[in-house]
Amino acid sequence: MHLASCATKIRAMKNAAFTLIVVALFALSVPARAEPELINTFKDWDAFVSGEGANKTCYIASVPKKSLPAKVRHGNVYMTVAHKPRRKIRDEVNVVAGYSFKADSQVRAISGATAEDLFVSGNEAWAYDPKMDGRLVAAMKRGASMVVRGTSERGTKTSYEFSLFGFSAAYAAISKACKIG
C-alpha cells in the first residue's frame, strides 16, 4: 500500500473518531433527547444540528491541522461555532483543549489581521461577548486558517492551527438549519 493511501486512511479514521467525540461531548451540553445529527462535512468542518423546534442547536466543528509543541500530549482539541436560537445566541465561538488552561490566563485567536483574546474556563476558551464572536466568525469566513495560542495549567505554551477550508459552507449550512439570517 502506498504511503499516501495509508495517510488518507489514517486521516479518515481520525476524522470519524473526532466526529464521534464532538457529537458525544456536545450532546452533554444540549437538552436531553437531543441527538446530534451530522448535516454534512464541508472540507475541514463538520456541520451538526441537535434538537427540534425551539430547542434546536446548530454547530460546526473542526480539529487542528497542526498542534505545537509536537512532543506534548494535547488530548482532543477542537473548535466549534454554534447557533442557539432559543437562547438568542448566534456565532458562539468555543475552543476546547484536552487539558485545562492556566487559571486567569487568556487564549489568543488569530486569523489574518484579526486577533482576539478569549477568556478561559477549565479546558475551554470563549469570546467575551457576542460582538467578539461576530468579529471572529467574520475573520474565519475571510481567512485560510486560524491560530489559537494558550498556556496549560502546567505552564506549557501551546499553539493550534485550524484550517478554515469549508468553514463558510459549513457556517451557511448551520445558519440555514437554525434559520439564522
Image (tube, rainbow, N blue to C red):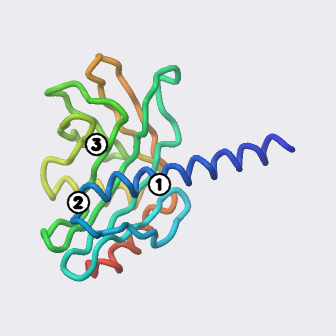
Given the image, on which type of amino acid does mark 3 rest?
Ala
Report which residue position mark 3 lands on.
115
For residue 118, the mark is none
Report which residue position mark 1 lands on.
20
Residue at (41, 74) in percent of width and height: 173
Residue reaching furthest top?
Answer: 155
Residue at (40, 46) in percent of width and height: 78
Report which residue position mark 2 lands on.
134
Q: Nearer the viewer, mark 2 or mark 3?
A: 2
Q: Earlier in the sequence, mark 2 or mark 3?
A: 3
Cα distance between the residues tagged 1 and 3: 30 Å
Answer left or right for 48 relative to 9: left
Given the image, on which type of amino acid does mark 2 rest?
Gly
Q: Mark 2–mark 3 contact, CB under 8 Å? A: no
Q: Residues within 10 Å of mark 3 (few under 14, many from 20)?
A: some
- For the N terminus, the quadrant is top right
Answer left or right for 14 relative to 31: right
Residue at (62, 49) in percent of width and height: 13
